[in-house]
Image (cartoon, rainbow, N blue to C red):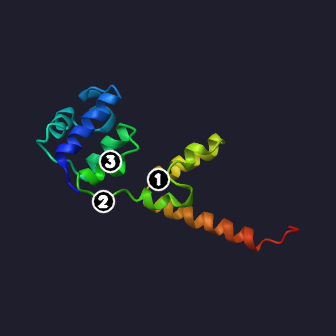
């Protein structure tokens, strides 16, 4: 559902909620502040990469909502959430494990695939392991 007016309003709201100026959001996202201003005022439509960069800079948990508002498919991370849900890494008490989940979530697809293959290998080894070893 593409709704660029609502997208611009939402970006402005999130920017103001984070107390970011246009310039500060531009520096954090790598998107020029003038382009952000144009998005907020519904003069230009951003690319998918721009929407993701803005959502990441705004530390927004609404990345998929923003993508949908801008007319793009949600991120692949939705499929990676699995049975533990999107907030599972925040619920982990161990900082190293939490950091692992964060690294996994932010890794490129090829790296995530490699990590999943390794994880499945470990699980298989554990299942076939002799209890005495």
Residue on which the image places disc 2: 73
Q: Find numbered disc 1 in the image and state the secondary structure of the residue it sits on.
A: loop
Q: How much space separates mark 3 and mark 1, taking CA atoms?
A: 14 Å
Residue at image coords 26%, 57%: 72
Residue at image coords 29%, 28%: 16
Q: Find numbered disc 2 in the image and state the secondary structure of the residue it sits on.
A: loop
Q: How much space separates mark 2 and mark 3, taking CA atoms?
A: 11 Å
Which numbered disc, 2 or 3, marks the residue closer to the eye? 2
Residue at image coords 31%, 38%: 29
Tell me if 27 is positioned left or right of 85 in this view: left
Q: Earlier in the sequence, mark 1 or mark 2?
A: 2
Q: Are marks 2 and 3 in contact (CB under 8 Å)?
A: no
Q: Earlier in the sequence, mark 2 or mark 3?
A: 3
Q: Nearer the viewer, residue 118 or 77?
A: 77
Q: Nearer the viewer, residue 82 or 118?
A: 82
Q: Which residue in the rendered view is the most extreme toward the left?
A: 43
Residue on which the image places disc 1: 107
Which numbered disc, 1 or 2, marks the residue closer to the eye? 2
Which quadrant: the C terminus? bottom right
Residue at image coords 30%, 32%: 15
Task: State the image coordinates of residue 81 (x, y, percent, origin top left).
Answer: 50, 57
Which numbered disc, 3 or 1, marks the residue closer to the eye? 3
Q: How much space separates mark 1 and mark 2, taking CA atoms?
A: 19 Å
Residue on which the image places disc 3: 52
**Vertical placement of 46 versus 34: above or below?**
below
Around disc 1, counting alpha carbons within 10 Å, would you say few (fewer than 14), some (14 to 19), or many (20 or more)?
few
Q: Find numbered disc 3 in the image and state the secondary structure of the residue it sits on.
A: helix
Around disc 3, counting alpha carbons within 10 Å, would you say few (fewer than 14), some (14 to 19), or many (20 or more)?
many
């Amino acid at each position: 559902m593409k709704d660029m007016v609502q997208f611009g309003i939402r970006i402005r709201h999130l920017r103001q909620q984070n107390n970011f100026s246009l310039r500060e959001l531009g520096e954090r996202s790598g998107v020029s502040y003038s382009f952000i201003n144009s998005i907020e005022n519904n003069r230009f439509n951003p690319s998918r990469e721009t929407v993701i960069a803005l959502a990441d800079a705004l530390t927004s948990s609404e990345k998929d909502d923003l993508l949908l508002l801008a007319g793009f498919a949600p991120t692949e991370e939705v499929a990676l959430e699995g049975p533990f849900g999107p907030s599972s890494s925040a619920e982990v008490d161990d900082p190293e494990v939490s950091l692992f989940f964060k690294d996994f979530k932010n890794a490129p697809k090829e790296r995530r695939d490699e990590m999943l293959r390794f994880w499945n290998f470990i699980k298989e080894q554990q299942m076939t392991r002799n209890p005495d070893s």
